[in-house]
Image (cartoon, helix red, strand yellow):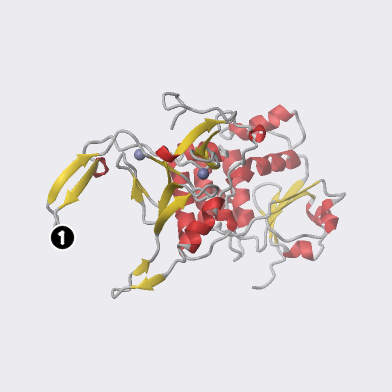
Amino acid sequence: MTEDTNIYRTLGPIYISSIQPLLNEEDLFEKYKIKTIISITKSNIPSKYKISPYDSYLQIPIDDLPSEVIIPYFSQINKLITETIYKQRSKDEIEHTIIEGTKPAKLELSGNAVLIHCQSGISRSVSFVCAYLMNRYNLSLNHALHAIRRNNSTDHLFQPNDGFIEQLEIYKENNWIVDLVYLRKKSSHWRAYRMEYLMSNLLSNKQTDSQFSNIQNDDNDNIKDENWFGFKCCKCRALLASSEVYIPHAPPFDKDDKQMYFTKNAFKSKRVVNRQIGQNECTQIFTEPLTWMRDKISSENDIGTKEDNNSNIMFDNLEGRLDCYKCGNKVGGWNWKGERCSCGKWMVPAIHLLKSKVIQVDRNNKLILPNDDRAI
Ligand SMILES: [Zn+2]
Ligand SMILES: [Zn+2]
């Protein structure tokens, strides 16, 4: 790839570039009044950009992969941009401006600029500038991209990857909320995005640690969220999952919904011999893939792909059981093709703990009983 040394102005004093101008040690303050540098890359930049005349340097060490989660960084970066390009006013006012989103407050420009760069200035940096513009001016993603492209009539690409596009849409749909616990609970778009990329990476063997979520350890003192809950092994009390990785689902309620029923067909025929309505109670607790499951899911899963006669790709070892990492007791199972909860709901892909094999506790390690409102 040719090295792109250009610095692209977007809307207002916000610039995008590849890493190249920084490696060339360009004088960004002299030329562009850039005071704040935000690096969306794992690479280092020369230390001169971390000291005066530069005020702030922030690095977000992520790769340009659709599975990288970028939403949690949006509010921090938006705030840093606002603080740099506008004259400092009260902290409240700045935060208010960002949360408000819908009505861009008339703030006075400070005369200083921000540079957001990544490796090539195409996907990562553009995504964060879009997040800022969408939030500040209540723009759709397309309008934000258009605003960036319109100012730059070059053939440089400004194109977030597919996963970043989905996350930017989710960001707007959920009124600029960046809390992943909230999104897991409330946004089916978020859950669909997460599982889609987790699964496609697992199936293509591009596994990285970042696809397996960590759960907070037993040190409950550090848990800030008062609504936190955990699922522990009923035999040895090892923490197996928590509210951060729990994937809620609504049981099907429409009697026309096929998922309501478990049907049994006659052998090799479509004739229904038995049809039972799903149970009211869910017996499974679905979660994201977790680090303690990693060996189980990926090695057992050795993702043998082969093609059948019709060139359809078939996958081997797509399901298995999950044993407690501490005592070895069977606590659940997983199936990449999906499986049904006892209530009838299809979950694809599915990783579950069995309700009968775990206990639910709150952040003070107190048991949550089934009649409690917080009980899952
Ligand atoms: Zn269910
Ligand atoms: Zn156990």
| Quarter of the image that includes the N terminus | bottom right
Instruction: Out of 78 and 4, give the one closest to the viewer.
Output: 78
From the viewer's perspective, is 255 left or right of 90? left
Quadrant of res 207: bottom right
Q: Which amino acid type corresponds to the residue marked 1 in the rendered image?
A: Lys
Q: Is residue 310 above or below residue 81?
A: below
Q: Is residue 372 visible?
A: yes
In this picture, residue 26 sits left or right of residue 38: right
Depth check, front residue: 25 or 145: 25
Residue 351: tell me if it is visible. no
Mark 1 C-beta closer than 8 Å to ligand 1:
no
Identified at 58% across, 54% down, the residue is: 210
Quadrant assignment, res 343 = top left
Residue 319: % across, % down? 39, 57
- Is 67 located above or below residue 282 in the figure? below
Q: Quadrant of the C terminus?
A: top left
Residue at the disc numbered 1: 268
Mark 1: secondary structure: loop
Q: Give 198 or 29, whichever is nearer the viewer.
A: 198
In the rendering, at what x and y percent does residue 203 appear? 45, 63
Q: Tell me the crowding category of disc 1: few under 14, some 14 to 19, or many 20 or more residues within 10 angstroms, Cα based.
A: few
Identify which residue is drawn at 41% across, 70% down. 305
Q: Residue 105, percent across and down?
A: 64, 32
Count of numbered circles in the view:
1
Compared with 280, 310 (above or below) is below
The percent coordinates of residue 296 (x first, y second) are: 49, 57
